Each structure stands twice: as structure tokens, then as C-alpha cells.
Image: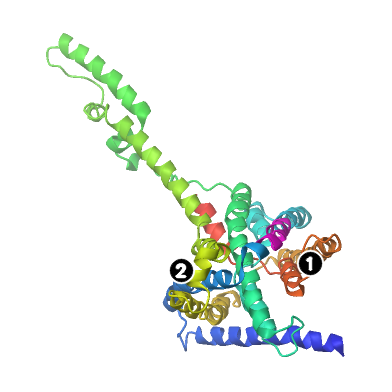
Amino acid sequence: MKFLKLYLVALTPILKLLLTTAFGTFLALDRIDILGKNARKHINAMVYFVFTPALIMSSLARTITLRNMFMLWFMPLNILVTYIAGTFLGWLLIKITRVPHHLHGLVLGCCAAGNLASLPLIVVPAICTERNSPFGDMNVCYRNGLAYASLSMAIGYIYAWSITFNVVRIYSPPVSNVVKVDESAVTPMSAIETDPENLSKCSTLTLATAEDNNTQPNGSIDRPEIECKVLDAQAKVPEKLKIMKLLKILADKINNMKVLIAPSTMAAIFGLTIGVVPQFRKVLVDDNTPLHVVQDSITMLGDASIPTMILLLGANLLKGLKGLGKQLPLIVGIIVVKYVALPVIGITIVRGAVHFKWIHPDPLYQFVLLLQHALPPAIVVSKLFPVVFLK
């Protein structure tokens, strides 16, 4: 009977998730078109830039203190182990199933990065609100569960963009941005102005032309006139190319840093700062403080994050449900890695940490650590793959 009760407690939030997801899929149908392509794009931007950062910031500021910050030190290490183990298992899957070379990076990303963003924020609070929840008082469980899931989400984003991004980039096939065209279709001027070697040749040709003009009465030459049109710009173009190259390198560096400081990551930093620093906490978080209305407003915005994410999840699944592709062995392999191998590794690691008393005995905290090893591939992988090819 105890097992049956725990099973129902675990199953009920998943059923709520599936029902809301199905409703999101229904709203995205062409006949309904409430969550059409444009609507999903704008709502997804609201979730990414407003709702989710508000939820993370408010939950961390309200629950994380300097004392329990030291108690959560194992979570970054636990997530790092999932990424390393997932990458290794993905490499084994590639060798066993002989995955096409152009899919190596995608397979490694799917096996390494788990969905630490939306699913823990959905599942953990839902379990806490159940009547027969094994995690004690509903309010305390809900508050702590949001904090654990929010911190897990922030750490997951950092690892995804710093570790998985580079793994996918290394194992993805290089894509050339140079488009081959017929040489006859390219004007000599455009080819010469963008090639420093041609500039050098033109400079040499111009000197030779000047000597020929001194010796020949009519000043005629046999070489194309177009090659010497860059003489006036030969001192400027190389410097311009250097500046453009430096600006491109700087833009790439800024773009790489921008993905590391996603809104959710910045919200986690602000939330942790407010929660850890007592002066900020007294002004913004505690009741009967002058600025507690700011925290209440942020919390109100964050409450819209979870239901909106579930609806978007269902709407985005509509396109994927139209076809699974021809890589059935590969899909089965990823399922085995994410739902069999990694959970076994996670149970071993977490139970070992409990045995050696590396983590505090909070059942909810242990549940979140175990959940991090049993999540489906991260949605962020779908963003990593196009970014890599654009590089």
C-alpha cells in the first residue's frame, strides 16, 4: 500500500503535466491557431526574458541563505557528473550504432545535457502540492523545491553553454561560409579588392607600367587596366581588413559570453546575492520591509512561468509528432542512455554521497539530485546545434 501511494503521488503530477501539454498541442493546431508560430515566438520570449528569470530570482532570494548555500555545494558537482557521464555514454553509442558523422555532435549533446530548465520547475513543485507528498509540509516543500529547481536550472544553463556547446562544436562537421561561384561571373575588381595577394601584384604591375610608359611613345600596355584601379586604395584596404577581422573576433567573443550570461543565469546570481547578503534580505525579502512589494511583484510574474512553459512544450511538440525520422536505433540508444544508464549512475552517486554524509539528509534535496540524472535531453540542444553550424 505504501508503494501504491508513492506511485500515485509520483504519477499525479506527470498526468497534470501531460494533460496541460496536450492542451497546448491542441491550441497549436492549424484549425485553432491560438499558439501558432508567431504566438509561440512571442510567448517564448516572454518566458525566457521575464517569467522564468522572475521565478528563479524570487525563489532563490526567498529560500537560499548563507548557511544553506554551503549545504548545496554538492549540486554543481552532481550536475557536472551527469554531463561527463552522458558525454562518455554518447560516445559509446556513436561507436556502437555507427551514427553518421554529421550527427555526432547532436548525439553527444542529447546524451550529455538533461532538461534541467523547465521539467524540475514543473515536476518538483507539483509533487509538493500533493496531499500525500512524502516531503512534509506543503508550503515548506514548495518553497524549498522551487529553490532547488531554480539553482539546478541556473547551473544547467552554465554547463550547457560552456561544456556541451564546445563538445557539439568539436564533433560537428565544419561548414564553409564560402560559396563557390563561376569565376567568369565575378568581376575582376571585386576579386582584386578583397585579396591582399592581388593588391601586391597590382602594386608590382603599376611600377612596371610606369617604366613602360617612360619607354613607349603611346604608353600602351598589354595588361588589364582593371588590375591597377586599386592603386589608390592599396594602402587603405589592408588596414581596413585588419580592423574588420578584429571586430569579427570581438563580436564572436561577446556572443560567446552572451550565451553564458543568459537571463536565467543573471537572475540566479541576483537571487543568490539577495538571499545570502543579510542587508539585502532584510530590505527586499522579509515581511514589513519598505521594498517587500518589489519581491511580491517579481513573485507574481514568476508564477506565470510554469503553466506557460507547459503550454509551450505541448505546442512545440506538434511539429515533432508528425514524424520520428529514420534513425530508430539512434533514438532507442539515446532513450537507454537517458532513462536507464544515467539513472543507475545517479542512484549510485547520490546514495554514496548520503552514505559518506557529503550531503544533508533532506529527502527533497536528494530527490532533486536523483532527478537530475533522469531527465530527457535538454531543449537547449536544439539551440546549440544551429549556433554551431552558424560558426
Give the magenta-colored segment's residue range. 69-82
SS class, disc 1: helix
Give the camera-side residue of 164 and 172: 164
For the N terminus, give its image quadrant: bottom right
- Relative vertical location of residue 286 with respect to residue 350 in this rendering, above or below: below
Q: Which residue is at a point 62% across and 60% down the rendered structure image?
A: 155
Residue 68, percent from left and from top: 67, 65
Quick one: label 2 or label 1, which is nearer the N terminus? Answer: 2
Give the camera-side residue of 231 and 290: 290
- Count neighbours of disc 1 (C-alpha within 10 A) and say few if under 14, some if 14 to 19, many if 20 or more: many
Residue 343 marker: 1
Residue 156, percent from left and from top: 62, 61
Residue 313 horizontal side relative to residue 14, left or right: left
Q: Quadrant of residue 331?
A: bottom right
Residue 251 marker: none
Residue of label 2: 49
Residue 90, percent from left and from top: 73, 57
- Count neighbours of disc 2 (C-alpha within 10 A) and say few if under 14, some if 14 to 19, many if 20 or more: some
- Relative vertical location of residue 229 with respect to residue 41 in this rendering, above or below: above
Give the camera-side residue of 362 and 228: 362
Q: Amino acid at mark 1?
A: Pro
SS class, disc 2: helix
